[in-house]
Amino acid sequence: MDVSYNQDLVNDIANKRIVLFVGAGASKWAQPRDGARFKDWKEFLLYAAEYISKPDLRGVVSDRVNAGDYLIASELIKDCLDDGWSDLLTAEFMRAADVSRLHAALISLNQRIIITTNFDKLIESAWDAAGLNNFPKIITKIDHKVFRLFRDDNYYLIKLHGSVDDVSEITFDKSSYQKRAFSNSFYKNLLDSLLLTHTFLFIGFSMDDPAVSLIIEQHAFKFSENRPHYILLSGDENYLVDGLSKKLRKLCVIRYKSENNHERLAEYIEGIAREGEIQRKLNFSAGRF
């Protein structure tokens, strides 16, 4: 893959100054061992809606999903299914999968902080398969304790919206977003602090998450002179849309071709990981560490 890499991004990788922000798109790469692929948010909600016994309610939920109102749709499904909702979440997101090329590439970046909105165990599996000396500290509850990461050198996996290990604490519907994201000052303070001190690299994340996108936009408005963050997106460059992303969110869009099941995304991550390691060695030899 013939590609040039942003030198600021390479330097931040070398200095372990990157926060990897991994969204649901990354999970689509994994191949569950039961043979069926992971569903995305829309697919899962439509699937779950089929378990609603009343046709009129099922139709309302399907309409909400197709309109992109996923939080309300999730809330309605949860209310209709009671314990069945937890069972469906567990059955979908607890499935084991072989480590994907993308997840392996993400771990190879060797960054100290990974944030994900995903509930599954794919990052943990990739970390284990990498054969590293230590596991990361896994954070599933955003409270005052998470700020220890600014005062130590440990590796962290922050599961921003919870983990399938405890579906009762997952942030997946309107009420849980209000409780654990919008009304939780630690949630905003954590992301604000990291946005000031680190460079974010978004992978498989669409910026449709209402809590995260609001924090990103508020931060960009308040600190408009700061260096930008980065997001990897598929498709051809769109100067107008990509320009607005940089203007309104301080997000530089890095485009890649989506053919062959987004193979270029993993290639890009692998390549910039190599560049970061080369730069890290140069820094060490020059005494810049």
Image: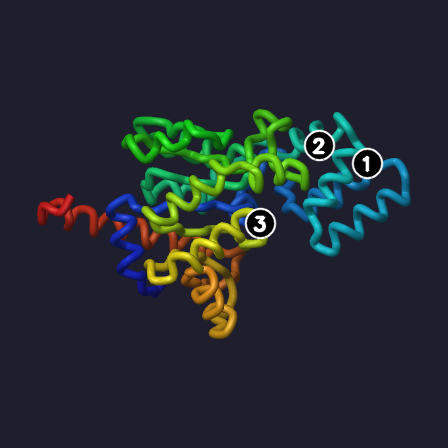
Please tell me how many numbered marks the rendered image carries: 3
In the rendered view of the protein, which quadrant contains the C terminus? top left
Classify 69 as above or below 257.
above
Classify 195 as above or below 163.
below
Task: Check disc 2: other Cα within 10 Å, few if <14, some if 14-19, many if 20+.
Answer: some
Q: Earlier in the sequence, mark 1 or mark 3?
A: 1
Q: Nearer the viewer, residue 215 or 231?
A: 215
Q: Quadrant of residue 174?
A: top right
**Is there a contact, CB below 8 Å, between mark 2 and mark 1?**
yes
Q: Can see residue 101? A: no
Instruction: Tell us which disc is closer to us: 1 or 3.
Output: 3
The residue beneath circle 3 is 209
Q: Nearer the viewer, residue 173 or 81?
A: 173
Q: Is residue 32 left or right of residue 86?
A: left
Disc sitting over residue 76 in the figure: none
Q: How is colour applied across the structure in the image?
A: rainbow
The residue beneath circle 1 is 51
Q: Quadrant of residue 173?
A: top right
The residue beneath circle 2 is 88
**At 45% from the left edge and 46% from the top edge, which residue is drawn?**
21
Mark 3 belongs to which amino acid? Asp
